[in-house]
Amino acid sequence: MMKRICDIILILLVITAIIVGGIIGTEYIRREKNEDKLSAVVAQIENINTDINDKENKQETIKLDGYDVEGIIEIPKIDIKYPIVSTTSDEAMKVAITKFWGANINDIGNFCMAGHNYKNGTMFGKTKYLKVGDKIKMTDLNLNTIEYEIFKIYTIDPNDITCIESVEPNTREITLITCTNGHKNRLITKAREVIK
């Protein structure tokens, strides 16, 4: 009788391991496909023909899974380069980094972005490794790139939205927002334009 119970428990453990392995594998494949799609959109943006006389090749908008793309965020220290979509929602955040608040990329004011903190390091999963002084590049759809330098990193309660406010008026600022502590807090990374 005891042997039969042990056999049943062993079979249940094997079945559970197979199911969990399948779920993890499926999620890994989904994220890898999404990473490939994001890289393709970045390449598409980087190859935009900005010659205004060439109306035939000029692209009005770039889409990613139905969302308008606003530009690119690049953080060399943590090796990320992603398109930014114009809408923040649970569904949009599964696809890309999202615009949370602000006017346009590289406009005066605070352009805020939200991204998931995936354990595999994709999206904003590695922002916890950033330090004050690290650089972030933002490129709009006209291929104008501005470099920003991180000046503040802190955590807040999820209901606190004071991070959308500019720290200094009449400056270009960006804010990165992601979850931390199992979604209990938000990690905020603020950067300001590097004036050359």
Image: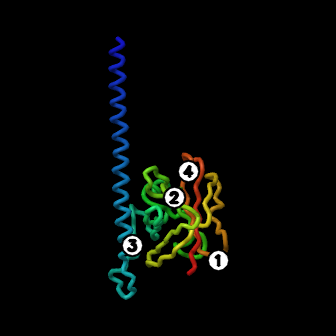
Q: Amino acid at mark 2?
A: Thr
- The residues tagged by marks 3 and 4 sit, at their Cα atoms, a distance apart of 30 Å
* Element carrying mark 3: helix
Q: Where 73 sits versus 16, above or below?
A: below
In this figure, which residue is indicated by the disc labeled 3? 45
Crowding at dot 4, Cα within 10 Å, few <14 / some 14-19 / many 20+, comes out as: some
Identify the image quadrant of residue 8. Answer: top left
Identify the image quadrant of residue 141. Answer: bottom left
In this figure, which residue is indicated by the disc labeled 1? 170
Q: Earlier in the sequence, mark 4 or mark 1?
A: 1
At which x and y percent is residue 172? 59, 74
Q: Nearer the viewer, residue 121 or 20?
A: 121
Q: Amino acid at mark 1?
A: Asn
* Element carrying mark 2: helix
At which x and y percent is residue 2? 36, 13
Crowding at dot 3, Cα within 10 Å, few <14 / some 14-19 / many 20+, comes out as: many
The answer to whether one can see residue 101 in this image is no
The reply to whether callout 4 and callout 1 are in contact (CB within 8 Å) is no
Q: Earlier in the sequence, mark 1 or mark 2?
A: 2
Q: Is residue 10 left or right of residue 79?
A: left
Residue at image x 56%, y 72%? 103
> Residue 190: which numbered mark, if any?
none
In this figure, which residue is indicated by the disc labeled 4? 180
In this figure, which residue is indicated by the disc labeled 2? 127
Q: Earlier in the sequence, mark 4 or mark 2?
A: 2
Residue at image x 49%, y 62%? 98
- The residues tagged by marks 1 and 2 sit, at their Cα atoms, a distance apart of 26 Å
Q: Amino acid at mark 4?
A: Thr
- The residues tagged by marks 4 and 2 sit, at their Cα atoms, a distance apart of 10 Å
The reply to whether callout 3 and callout 2 are in contact (CB within 8 Å) is no
Q: Amino acid at mark 3?
A: Ile
Q: Quadrant of the C terminus?
A: bottom right
